[in-house]
Image (tube, helix red, strand yellow):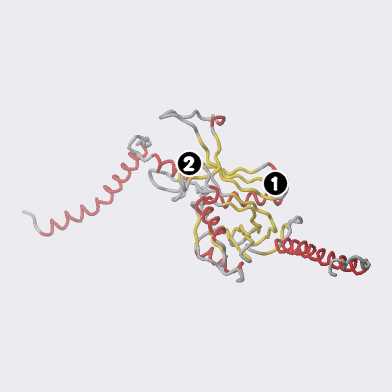
Amino acid sequence: MWTKKAEVKRMSKKRKAAPKEVASEAVTTNAMEEQQPARKRSLMTDLSKVQRHEEEGVDHQNGDATISSFRNKEKVLVLCSSRITFRYRHLMMDIVGLLPHSKKDVKVQAKDNKSATLNELVDLKSCSSCLFFECRKKRDLYMWVSKCPSGPSAKFLVNAVHTMAELKLTGNHLKGSRPILTFSASFDMHPHFQLLKELFTQVFCTPKDHRKSKPFFDHVLSFAILDNHIWFRNYQISVPHHGTEKLERGALDKMTLIEVGPRFCLNPIKIFSGSFGGQTLYENPFYVSPNLVRSQEKRQKAGKYVKKVKAKQRRRTHVISNLLEPDELADVWHE
């Protein structure tokens, strides 16, 4: 028969032997894991998740980050000033439709301190860039492109505005698809154009794997320089096919471009080192203010009026200096 003292001794022996058994089991499991081959990919594995983890440097089996890779988290805040006209507002909405990584905000007073107000709004919206459309006198539209909060930033005068509602072109592409950015060779000739090229690339290029973007390219954003102006165009990539036939890879000669819109022209004014201000890096020597253009037009019109007044005065002096002599037969018929 078992006594109480004998049972206590038996339990104490089991407790002493337990750590050795646990250690031996841990050694055997580690050896089995080392001998176990690497997991192979099959149809049941989520390939998209595996590829994403490989791009981000993450082991898809353990979920451990091995090498941290760069991920583009660019977000653009698009907003305008108060008293903007409907035409310029439609242009802003067209650009918002082209940028799936953009955010909108309410109108901002143009007379406020732009550098402090806009940088604070960009920070509140968790954005890294800003497109600000500033309308003055309900005539002139200025566009600011800025990297917040450290800069650089550029100011443009927007001319030749044609919205998508005005053009009604035949081109069409999916909303949210990623664009192909094309720049003319003139962008690489001058340093200020190189800076603007990099600025446009970071603002208008949709980040990869963005939640609101489509994972393919079906339109082209073109930036061309002509007469010291930057001309913007948007084209759809049209691929002719019949039924289920697929186009061969690299068959660019069969692809065509169809314009979608909008259209506008950017006249660069200044480039600043900071966000919405700071040291001036570049100033366009060919820029003429629209106020100066209007004043010259008024002077030309005023010159026409002055010419008319002077002509009338010359006619009066001519009539006074060349008076006709009285005619003897002038009152014959009155008698």
Numbered badge on residue 76 = none
Label 2 element class: strand
Compared to 281, does 263 lie above or below?
above
Q: Which of 139 and 288 is in front in this view?
A: 139
Residue 172, percent across and down? 49, 43
Q: Which of 303 and 90 is in front in this view?
A: 303
Label 1 element class: strand
Kindly identify which residue carries mark 2: 216
Compared to 177, does 137 lie above or below?
below
Query: Callout 1: few (<14), some (14-19), or many (20+) C-alpha neighbours within 10 Å?
Result: few
Comes first in the chain, label 2 or label 1: 2
Residue 210, percent across and down? 46, 49
Kindly identify which residue carries mark 1: 226
Query: Mark 2: which amino acid?
Result: Phe
Q: How far apart are marks 2 and 1 (CA)?
A: 30 Å
Q: Which of 180 and 236 is in front in this view?
A: 236
Compared to 72, does 148 lie above or below?
below
Location of the C terminus by quadrant is: bottom right
Give the quadrant of residue 284: bottom right
Q: Nearer the viewer, residue 197 or 303?
A: 303
Left or right: 196, with 296 as reference point: left
Query: Callout 2: few (<14), some (14-19), or many (20+) C-alpha neighbours within 10 Å?
Result: few
Query: Mark 1: which amino acid?
Result: Leu
Give the quadrant of residue 277: bottom right
Left or right: 228, with 39 as reference point: right
Left or right: 238, with 310 as reference point: left
